[in-house]
Image (spheres, rainbow, N blue to C red):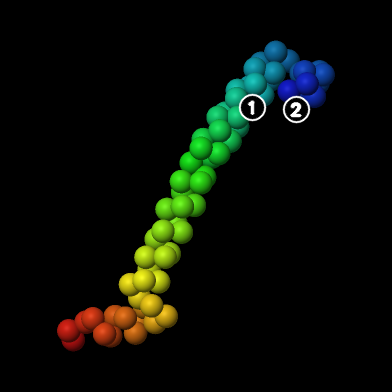
């Protein structure tokens, strides 16, 4: 993509702005790659914990079983 941008007839400021955007996207992708598996694992753990605690019951049923009212 960088090669395609260098062939465009744009002012120098536009090229600099595009370089900043490309660098930001590259940083974002790198962060996502490093955090993605961690985040996915955390969500999976929370879902598994919810199943262990609540079982097949819906939240309304669990609330009725644990509320004092």
**Quadrant where the N terminus is found in the figure:** top right
For the view shown, which residue lies furthest in the left direction? 68
Residue at x 42% of width, y 53% of height: 42
* CB atoms of marks 1 and 2 within 8 Å: yes
Figure quadrant of residue 20: top right
Query: Few, some or many C-alpha atoms within 10 Å of disc 1 (few <14, some 14-19, many ≥20)?
Result: some
Does residue 2 lie above or below 68 as drawn?
above
Given residues 12 and 57, the one toward you in this image is 57
Q: Secondary structure at mark 1?
A: helix
| Disc 2 target residue | 1
Q: Earlier in the sequence, mark 1 or mark 2?
A: 2
Q: Is residue 46 left or right of residue 24?
A: left
* Residue 41 seen in render: yes
How far across and how far down the image is residue 38, in percent?
46, 46
Residue at x 36% of width, y 71% of height: 52
Residue at x 39% of width, y 61% of height: 46
**Quadrant where the C terminus is found in the figure:** bottom left
| Disc 1 target residue | 22
How far across and how far down the image is residue 23, in percent?
60, 25
Disc 1 to disc 2, C-alpha distance: 9 Å
Does residue 38 lie above or below 2 as drawn?
below
Figure quadrant of residue 28: top right
Does residue 5 lie above or below 39 as drawn?
above
Query: Few, some or many C-alpha atoms within 10 Å of disc 2 (few <14, some 14-19, many ≥20)?
Result: few
For the view shown, which residue lies furthest in the top direction? 12
Given residues 36 and 3, the one toward you in this image is 36
Label at residue 65: none
Q: Is residue 24 left or right of residue 8?
A: left
């Amino acid at each position: 993509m960088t090669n395609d941008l260098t062939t465009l007839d744009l002012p120098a400021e536009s090229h600099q702005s595009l370089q900043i955007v490309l660098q930001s996207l590259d940083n974002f992708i790198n962060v996502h790659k490093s955090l993605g598996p961690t985040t996915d694992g955390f969500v999976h753990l929370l879902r598994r914990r919810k199943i262990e605690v609540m079982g097949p019951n819906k939240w309304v049923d669990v609330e009725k079983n644990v509320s004092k009212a």
